[in-house]
Image (cartoon, coloured by chain):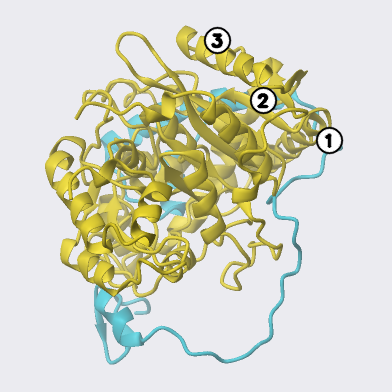
Chain colours: A cyan, B yellow
Amino acid sequence: MPDMDINYVAHLARLELSDDEKQRIAAQLKDVLKYVEKLNELDVSNVEPTAHATPLSNVLRADETKPSIDPALIWKNAPEHARDLFIVPKIIE
Amino acid sequence: MSGLHTLSIHELRDRLRRGEVSAREVTQSLLDRIAGVDDKLKAYMWLNPDDALRQADAVDAKGDKPLAGIPIAMKDVLNVAGQPCTCASKILKGHVSVYDATVVRQLREAGAIILGRTNMDEFAMGSSTENSSWGVTRNPWDLERIPGGSSGGSAAAVAGDEAFGALGSDTGGSIRQPAALCGCVGLKPTYGRVSRYGLVAFASSLDQIGPFTKNVADSALMLGVISGHDAGDSTSVPRPVPDYAAALGRGVKGLRIGLVRECQIEGLDREVDAAVKAAVKKLEDLGAEVVEVSLPHMQYCVAVYYIIATAEASANLARFDGVRYGARVAGDDVIEMYGRTRGQGFGAEVKRRIILGTYALSAGYYDAYYLRAQKVRTLIRQDFEKAFQKCDAIVTPTSPEVAFKAGEKTDDPLKMYLSDIFTISVNLAGTCGISIPCGFTAQPKLPVGLQILGKSFDEETIFRVAHAYEQATAWHKERPAL
């Protein structure tokens, strides 16, 4: 079984974890990943994957402008905003 | 007007239409019931009595709208304009919805009163409602036990006569399992039957909204209201909505009921097994033909599910980043802000699943985990297609066991995941399933659920079977002493 690098995965997920959490999650997921190895018992080389169970494909609609949600309501839920913009920490030096 | 809270939707509707009670009286009676028992059950996270009564006063309860004047409770995962929507997560604390989910609009158009918000496992991840940042909901049959999950609040509310009907969401059994553990009726419709617009996404290829009710006829009524094509959800299917009520009362004579060979698993509670076998005997007595079917890949369902559901969740939950809504924890740069916001905003189970899902999708592991799981999902779907060539509906236990005590499984996530074995396959196959009461354990007295599974878009047949069984038994009339 491959070893999961919890620091790397937590970084990919943009999830800050304490050392305690890292240890606990890594141990618990070790059990889960071991269980998931069951899937290796099956030969799936000639099986198509299923991404979803809907009988539809290529759902299209006309490209029309329509009224949208009032931005004033959106801003009420924003952690920080000004002049109709979301404020975030500096991205570019 | 006391005692109204014990009525079913149909009974209530008759009284409202005859003008014997008003929508305000009905709503007030329910609010009184909630005020009386919810301190014990903790099914509701949020309630606005004044708003509910205002809605009641505005309804023409004598009109012919299907749910005119009936209050319906919402799981905290569905957006209702102007109401909080937190998914029982700290990361969405204080969030107020800016639009109605399509199902909410449909309920309003049907004359329903949109009542309070029910407790759930955070972001619908769990089988016990213990993963809520808000608090623990109790099982109405035994307050030391969990109500099941993730829609535990909706199930406990209906079973405890704190709601006439409620909506939940089902990704791997989150409607059927709590319905079974609380002793009410819970339906997971076929994928694509009900619009997911306005449902906070957990695993988009598996999620489906469905009703909790006190009986099968009410379930059919509610499904009729919330079904149908919606441009807001590209996976909602443009098929006509049948008259589900017409499926009721037709009996089971001539129907072939499939019994799944692989359901005799280790860990299946003896009393659950006995109750389900007795239910099958009852269906046979009522004229159904029982045939054995096989779902050979059932033993792989839990593994497939916990790869696919967590992978989809890791992508869906990326939106909770402290930028547009919800809580934010400051950081020196944007990466640190994301990490801290998510690290402090999400609870333990959600973090565990985000890590697992991110890992399953990460470079070098995608083929081994995610792609392989998707391929086995195909085999599971094909199992159902083959089984349904031999029968019209399949019957299984909903859950291998009855409600367990709070805290009993919280340290062992894998053990918790394995209890979903009978419900998960339905979401993977995209088919429909209903859980109805089929008995009780002796000591303590706890409800057992019977799961009836149907072909895609054949909710009519599972309603037909469920209704025939219900009419021939009295389990659904039993009420917990609260």
Q: Are marks 3 and 1 in contact (CB under 8 Å)?
A: no
Which numbered disc, 1 or 2, marks the residue closer to the eye? 2
Residue on which the image places disc 2: B298
Query: Does dot 3 land on a helix, a strand or a loop?
Result: loop
Depth check: give the residue in front, A11 or B438: B438
The spot of residue A14 in percent (x, y) is 40, 55
Mark 2, secondary structure of its residue: helix
Q: Residue drawn at (60%, 17%), measured in percent from left and top?
A: B282
Q: Position of residue B265 (x, y in %)?
A: 59, 13
In the image, taking residue B429 as reference, residue B418 lies left or right, namely left
Q: Is residue B372 visible to us here?
A: yes
Dividing the picture into quarters, in which one does residue B350 lie?
top left
| Residue B256 position within the rendered picture, expressed as x and y whole percent measured from the top left | 76, 26
Q: Nearer the viewer, residue B113 or B372?
A: B113
Which mark is on residue A45?
1
- Counting labels gives 3
Q: Which residue reaches farthest right?
A: A46
Q: Nearer the viewer, mark 3 or mark 1?
A: 3
Badge 2: how crowded within 10 Å, few (<14), some, or many (20+)? some
Q: Dot 3 corresponds to which residue?
A: B266
Residue A1 visible in the displayed image: no
Disc 1 element:
loop
Q: Quadrant of residue B25?
A: bottom left
Q: Label 3 amino acid?
A: Glu
What amino acid is found at the position of numbered circle 2 in the picture? Met
| Quadrant of the drawing holding the C terminus of chain B | top left
Distance (Cα) linking label 1 and label 2: 19 Å
Observer-nearest residue: B361 or B100?
B100
Q: Earlier in the sequence, mark 2 or mark 3?
A: 3
